[in-house]
Amino acid sequence: MAEEENTEESKSSGAGKGMIIALIALVVILLLAVAGGAYFLYSQGLFSPKDGATTEEMTKKEEAGDSKETFKANVDDLVLNITNAKGKEKLMKLSFAVKSVEPTIEAIMEEYRAEVIDVVIAQISARSSEELLTVGGKALLKDELLEEINGVINEVTSNNEDIKANNIKKILFTTFVIK
């Protein structure tokens, strides 16, 4: 009879030890999951101020004047000829806005509209419709248009010391249709 009680006691204590080990493992796994999730959110910039910038970086930007007001100018309804990889012609309708730190950017863009459109035509003509339909192609076009349009604006305003060089900071496509 005593032997039966010892056997039952050892069986129940073995099950209890297994349950404790399982609970400890579960707690460890949960802690790792929470730590991993927190690291992911931190790396995505959710816990840091303003797009992952540290407080020191934000202070430096404010001191450097990077938090200036931006101004926009639009170039609307350009209809352009492009070709696909097989040489077949297509039409493209393009409108975009430029964001600048220069308050007079709208007047400058209007005055030198022909030069800006010439740059746009040259950049579009150098690409196929297949390239322009990809996300990477559009991003590359934006980068090159930004550089080229800044070059035009820098050239035509070089005698005006009040207008800073490379004042266009961003190009935003508002219409991008290829047919």
Image: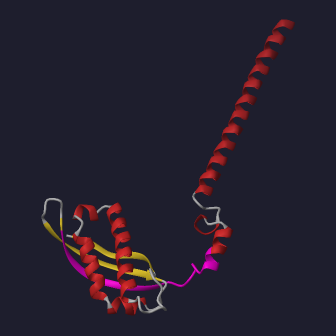
In percent of the image, x 63 and y 47: which residue is there? 36
Q: How many marks?
A: 0
Q: Would you say residue 1 is visible in this rendering?
A: no
Describe residue 28's horizontal placement relative to residue 135 as left or right. right
Q: How is the image coloured?
A: secondary structure
**Vertical placement of residue 169 versus 104, above or below:** above
In percent of the image, x 64 and y 79: which residue is there? 63
In percent of the image, x 87 and y 7: which residue is there? 2
Front residue of 9 and 81: 81
Front residue of 3 and 106: 106
Front residue of 53 and 40: 53
Residue lying at the far right in this picture: please name it: 2
Residue 66 lies within the magenta run: yes
Specify the quadrant that holds the C terminus: bottom left
Q: Position of residue 166 (x, y in %)?
A: 44, 80
Front residue of 54 and 50: 54
Region in magenta: 61-82
In percent of the image, x 37 and y 79: which residue is there? 151
Specify the quadrant that holds the N terminus: top right
Q: Would you say residue 112 is visible in this rendering?
A: yes
**Vertical placement of residue 123 versus 160, above or below:** above
Q: Position of residue 20 (x, y in %)?
A: 75, 30
Q: Position of residue 43 (x, y in %)?
A: 59, 56
Describe residue 120's horizontal placement relative to residue 101 as left or right. left
